[in-house]
Image (tube, rainbow, N blue to C red):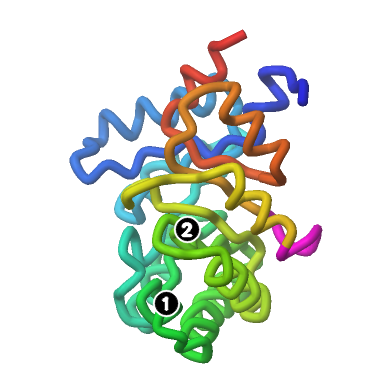
Amino acid sequence: MELTREQLAKYLDHTNLQPNATQEDIQKTCMEAIKYNTASVCVNAHWIAYVKKELENTTVNPIAVVGFPLGATSTNAKTFEAKTALLDGAEEIDMVINIGELIGGNDEFVQNDIHSVVQEVHSKHKLLKVIIETSFLNNSQIIKACELAEKAGVDYVKTSTGFSSAGAKVEDVALMRKTVGNRLGVKASGGIHSRKEALAMIAAGASRLGVSATVKILSEN
């Protein structure tokens, strides 16, 4: 797949989720995103109001993560976190599912957990992506997670937080795309460090990429 730098940039959620990120670091992330005109800046919810202000009068969206990175907070906590981030200016929410409940086979809980956040996000006409953390899952669990997310009404399914044992894999992205068809977006994130890797994820079916190596990727020929 051949994409111009400008086209590839619009696949990228330029990400800084480091717990030790300072305001200066977040500002640098925003300036890089504006320079390259990426799809978004993805940060922890604390920074959303600041990022929203930094990205004013640009086409770059602010994204907040919710239930991050473990997904094991309560449904009420995730819903409130999403509500607060939206009030602070988030245009998209990336939420982590309850991975343990998925693996344990508690499908009803997982779907309801997601749906509660879906209702909050969609009531503000914003987008919700659901992180299923593929490194913990086998193929049948990846399929199940995607099916439950779709039933719950999400806009995207996403591979990874980038904080687990492994990030996105081409074969997982392809399986997720096969499962959701063209009905949902698929976001690959974690461990994407080069233009070649980014293009491989897109070829496998990713419609968005979460990357912190944005400058490196977009500087490569």
Q: In this view, does 2 lie above or below 139?
A: above
Q: Which mark is residue 103?
A: 1
Res 32 visible:
yes
Secondary structure under tag 2 reads: helix
Determine crowd level at label 1: few under 14, some 14-19, many 20+ residues with C-alpha closer than 10 A: some
Magenta span has 69? no
- Real-space Cα separation, disc 1 to disc 2, in angstroms: 11 Å
Res 87 visible:
no
Q: Name the residue under label 2.
A: 134
**Residue at 40% across / 62% down in the picture?**
136
Q: What stretch is highlighted in magenta?
A: 179-185
Q: In this view, does 214 lie above or below 221?
A: below
Secondary structure under tag 1 reads: helix
- Amino acid identity at mark 1: Ile
Residue at the extreme top: 221
Q: CB atoms at circles 1 and 2 under 8 Å apart?
A: no
Comparing 95 with 124, the one in front is: 95
**Residue at 72% across / 26% down in the picture?**
7
- Horizontal and vertical percent position of residue 80: 38, 76
- Horizontal and vertical percent position of residue 86: 48, 63
- Horizontal and vertical percent position of residue 170: 60, 42
